[in-house]
Structures are given as C-alpha cells and as structure tokens.
Image (cartoon, grey):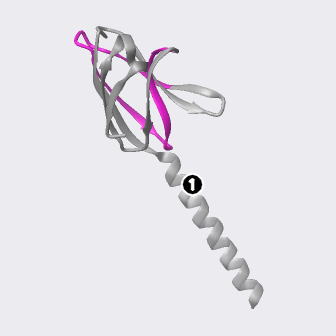
Amino acid sequence: MKYKVLIFAAMFFLAACTSNKNNSDKGGNSVVSGNLKNASNLSLKLEMLTPAGFQLRDSIKTDADGNFELNTNISEIGFYRISLDPKNFCVFILDANNNIKIQGDATRLNRGCEVSGS
C-alpha cells in the first residue's frame, strides 16, 4: 500500500512539474516601443543576454520621426537590449507581457536612455 501511495505521489509531482514547464515555455506577447532622436529610418535589434553573449531575438526599423513599436513573444525574463550597433545600445529587463517604452538619442544610447515599464 505504501508503494502505491509513493508511486502516485511521484507521478503527480512529475506531472505538475511538466505542466508548469510547458506553460512557461509559451511565454507572452511583449511590446517594446519608443522614440529615438536622430534615428530616422534606422534598424534596431532586440537582443537577449545569454551565457554565450547577446542573441538576436527580433528587429525593427524606425519611422522617419524615430518612432518604433516591436511586438515580440518573450518566453522568459531576462536582460535584453535594443541596439543600433555593438557599442550603441540600451539595456533593460524584459518579461512576458511587459510593455516597455524607451526614449533617448540614437547617437548615444549607451550614455543614457530612459526606460519605463521594465
């Protein structure tokens, strides 16, 4: 009888762990938007910091006024950055279902950008 209870408990525990993992893998839609001065029609990259370095997750082009809105699926919380090049970027924390707004100057993102919602 004890073995049946232990086996049942182990199966329940494994099923619960598997269920939580599958739900977290789905992630959620996050929005990264904003306005960058001096960024007319520039390409921006959304990159995630991983143990191997930054990994490209998505990209977008700003409009003529430097506005952008990037809708992307985020499956896990982490450090992300919007970058124009490897030396000009803005770092923030992003999680599923976040709405992040970024304001700054495209010529010097790495020297200061304003991030809200992170």
Q: Residue 72's quadrant in the figure?
A: top left
Q: Position of residue 103 (x, y in %)?
A: 29, 24
The location of residue 13, given as percent across then percent down, is 63, 70
* Image position, residue 81 (x, y; %): 46, 27
- In the visual, does 86 lie left or right of 62? right
Label 1 crowding class (10 Å Cα cut-off): few <14, some 14-19, many 20+? few
- The majority secondary structure of the magenta stretch comes to strand
Range of magenta residues:
57-85
Kindly state the secondary structure of the residue where label 1 is placed: helix
The residue lying furthest to the front in this view is 111
Is residue 60 one of those drawn in magenta? yes
Foreground pick, 36 / 64: 36
Image quarter (top left, top right, bottom left or bottom right) of the N terminus: bottom right
The residue closer to the viewer here, 31 or 100, is: 100
The residue lying at 52 percent from left, 15 percent from top is 86
- Total marks in image: 1
Image location of residue 112, percent across then percent down? 37, 23
- Residue drawn at (36%, 44%) of the image: 97
Position of residue 6 relative to residue 13, above or below, is below
The image quadrant that residue 100 belongs to is top left
Residue 70, quarter of the rendered image: top left
Left or right placement of residue 19 versus residue 38 in this view: right
Residue situated furthest right in the rendering: 3
Q: Say which amino acid is labelled 1.
A: Lys
Q: Is residue 29 left or right of residue 51?
A: left
Residue named by callout 1 = 21
